[in-house]
C-alpha cells in the first residue's frame, strides 16, 4: 500500500481504445467481424493524444446523462462493493489500493479483485487525469458476482472524482464516483449508440474523459467528456472537499468476480475476445503535460495474470507506462 501524503497537482491523459474485432463494439454500436474468432486490435487514434491539452469547455452537460434518481437506482447497489474495494471506512477514508486485500487478509470484495495497468506516482503538483477509454456494447455479464471497472481512472493529487467505465448485469456506463462527500456514484451516462455517436471518434469505439482540478483553494475537481461532434468538453460531474481516497492514482484494468468450480472466473466469460487498450497515457504536473513514464508512473497495482482466473486472457504493457493492452 502506498502512503497517503497530501500533494498538490498531476494530470494523467490516456488513450484507451477498443478493438474492432469479434465481440467488440464499433463506433456504430454492435458492428462485428463475422468470421474472426479472435479480436482484431485497432490502435488508439493518435489525434486523441492532443485532446487532453485542449481547454475548450462547451459549457454544456454530457448528453444523455442520467437523472440523479436513475443513477442511484442503477448504481446505488454497487456503493458498498466499490467502497470495500478501496478499504473505505466511514470517518477514516479509503486505505486499500486497487486490486489488493485488506490487511487482515480477507478479500476486499468478491472472490477475486485483481488489477493491472498504469499507476500514477504521488508527485508534487498533481492536479488531474485525462484518458480516451475503451467502451463496448458487447460485454455480457451473466453472474451477479461480477462487476468490471475497466478502464477506471483516478488522478493523483487528492481527487474528488474517479471516472469509471462500469459493466455488470444489465449495466454499461461511464460514471463518476464522488470521493470527497457522498462516497458513491453521483453521475452516469449509458454506453449506447447515442453515446458512441457523440463521444467516440467514430473509429476506435473509445471516449476521451478527464478529471481535473479546477480550484486549488477549494480542492474542486471536474469530470468532463470530449464531444467529438462539437469539439468541446461536456461536463459530467463536479465536486469539492477533502478526498477520502488516496493521493496516488491510476488508469487501470480492474474487476471483481467469482470463480466457478471449473476454476474460470465469471469475468473471463463476460470479456472474452474483447480488447481493452489504454494508449497515449500522459500526466500533467503544475500545468505541464508529459507522457506517463518511469519518472511519474509505475505498475504498483499489478496483479499476476493468474489472479484473473482466465486462461484465455492476455495483457501487456506495450510501452512503459503510456500504453497498456488487454484482450479478454
Image (cartoon, grey):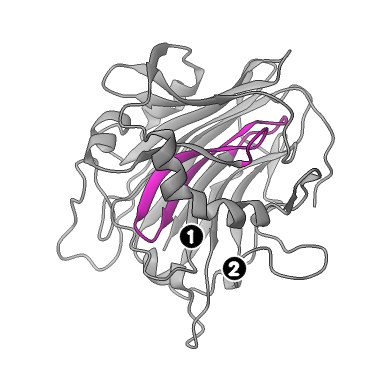
Residue 324 appears in the picture as rendered: no
Numbered tag placed on residue 84 in the rendering: none
Q: Which residues are magenta?
A: 154-183
**Which secondary structure lies at badge 1?**
strand
Is the residue under label 2 in contact with that under label 1 (CB below 8 Å)? yes
- x%, y% of residue 1? 80, 52
Mark 2 Cα shell of 10 Å, populated few (<14), some (14-19), many (≥20) = some
- x%, y% of residue 212? 58, 23
* 178 displayed left or right of 123: left
Vertical arrangement, residue 27 with respect to residue 149, above or below: above
Q: CA distance from mark 1 to mark 2?
A: 9 Å
- x%, y% of residue 116? 59, 55
- Which quarter of the figure is the C terminus placed in? bottom left
Q: Nearer the viewer, residue 1 or 286?
A: 1
Vertical arrangement, residue 206 with respect to residue 30, above or below: above
Numbered tag placed on residue 110 in the rendering: 2
- x%, y% of residue 2? 80, 47
**Which secondary structure lies at badge 2?**
loop
Amino acid at each position: 500500500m502506498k502512503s497517503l501524503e497530501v500533494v498538490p497537482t498531476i494530470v494523467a491523459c490516456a488513450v484507451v481504445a477498443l478493438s474492432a474485432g469479434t465481440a467488440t463494439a464499433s463506433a456504430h454500436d454492435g458492428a462485428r467481424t463475422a468470421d474472426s474468432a479472435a479480436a482484431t486490435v485497432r490502435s488508439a487514434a493518435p489525434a486523441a493524444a492532443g485532446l487532453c491539452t485542449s481547454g475548450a469547455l462547451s459549457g454544456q452537460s454530457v448528453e444523455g446523462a442520467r437523472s440523479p434518481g436513475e443513477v442511484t437506482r442503477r448504481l446505488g447497489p454497487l456503493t458498498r462493493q466499490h467502497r470495500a474495494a478501496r478499504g473505505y471506512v466511514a470517518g477514516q477514508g479509503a486505505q486499500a489500493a486497487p486490486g489488493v486485500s485488506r490487511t487482515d487478509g480477507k478479500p476486499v470484495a468478491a472472490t477475486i479483485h485483481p488489477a493491472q495497468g498504469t499507476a500514477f506516482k504521488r508527485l508534487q503538483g498533481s492536479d488531474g487525469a485525462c484518458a480516451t477509454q475503451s467502451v463496448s456494447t458487447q460485454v455480457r455479464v451473466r453472474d451477479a458476482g461480477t462487476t468490471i471497472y475497466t478502464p477506471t481512472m483516478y488522478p493523483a493529487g487528492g481527487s474528488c472524482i474517479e471516472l469509471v467505465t462500469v459493466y455488470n448485469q444489465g449495466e454499461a456506463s461511464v460514471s463518476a464516483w464522488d470521493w470527497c462527500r457522498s462516497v458513491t456514484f453521483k453521475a452516469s451516462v449509458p454506453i449506447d449508440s447515442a453515446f458512441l455517436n457523440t463521444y467516440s471518434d467514430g473509429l476506435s469505439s473509445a471516449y476521451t474523459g478527464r478529471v481535473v482540478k479546477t480550484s486549488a483553494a477549494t480542492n474542486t475537481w471536474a469530470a468532463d467528456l470530449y464531444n467529438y461532434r462539437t469539439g468541446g468538453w461536456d461536463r459530467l460531474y463536479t465536486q469539492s472537499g477533502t478526498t477520502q481516497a488516496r493521493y496516488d492514482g491510476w488508469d487501470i484494468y480492474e474487476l471483481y468476480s467469482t470463480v466457478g468450480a471449473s476454476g474460470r472466473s465469471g469475468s473471463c466469460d463476460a470479456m472474452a475476445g474483447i480488447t481493452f487498450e489504454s494508449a497515449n497515457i500522459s500526466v500533467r504536473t503544475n500545468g505541464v503535460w508529459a507522457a506517463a513514464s518511469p519518472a511519474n508512473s509505475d505498475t504498483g497495482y499489478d496483479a499476476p495474470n493468474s489472479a484473473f482466473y482466465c486462461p484465455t486472457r492476455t495483457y501487456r504493457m506495450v510501452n512503459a507506462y503510456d500504453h497498456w493492452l488487454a484482450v479478454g
